[in-house]
Image: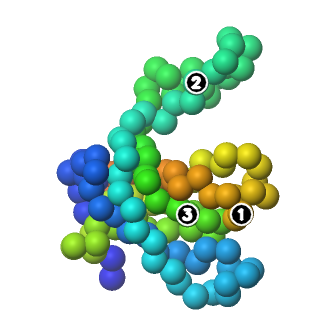
Amino acid sequence: MLQLGDSDRVREGESIAFTGFPIGAVLGLYPATHHGLVSTISPIVLPALSGRQLSVTMIKRLRDPFDIFQLDATAYPGNSGSPLFLPKTGEVVGVLNMVFIKESKESVLEKPSGISYAIPIKYLKALLKTIKDE
């Protein structure tokens, strides 16, 4: 059973790992563990080049942004949704969410960026509490 940790205690530079099923169609359904570190903890807000690119969703995120872990770790398709954990304790501190793509989706296998993102586990804990309270 996975133990949910305290994502508020995670710091930049901290070692992390995630286990998932990357590139399942090629590698099969065998779990693979990758490691890396937390590069930064920052709000998930993407800059707009002009006002025309702003949407209602983007404006809401700008008003009330939530933090996300930027990872120095290579993830592939199939890793999304994987638990992000601390190697020393095994505590889950996040959920792998997305990968930064340099060129195109097709190039992610040939030229991975090495930049991945994870949602801190505190948001999952809040969601689970809401469901439990209903």
SS type, badge 3? loop
Could you say whether the residue bearing mark 1 is in a helix, strand or loop?
Answer: loop
The dot on residue 47 is: 2
Q: Is residue 29 visible?
A: yes
Is the residue marked by circle 3 packed among few (<14), some (14-19), or many (20+) residues within 10 Å? Answer: many
For the residues bearing labels 3 and 2, Cβ distance under 8 angstroms:
no
Q: Position of residue 14 (x, y in %)?
A: 27, 56
Is residue 89 positioned above or below 119 on the image?
below
Decide which of 110, 93 is in the foreground and name it: 110
Residue 115 vs residue 7: left or right?
right
Instruction: Quote the CA–CA distance across marks 3 and 1.
Output: 12 Å
In primary-sequence order, the first of circles 3 and 2 is 2
Residue found 47% across the figure and 59% down from its top: 73
Q: Is residue 25 left or right of residue 121?
A: right
Find residue 35 and report its horizontal and vertical position in percent: 40, 68
Disc 3 or 1, which lies upstream in sequence? 3
Q: Residue lying farthest front?
A: 111
Decide if residue 92 is in sight here: no
Q: Residue at x 28, y 51 (%)?
A: 13
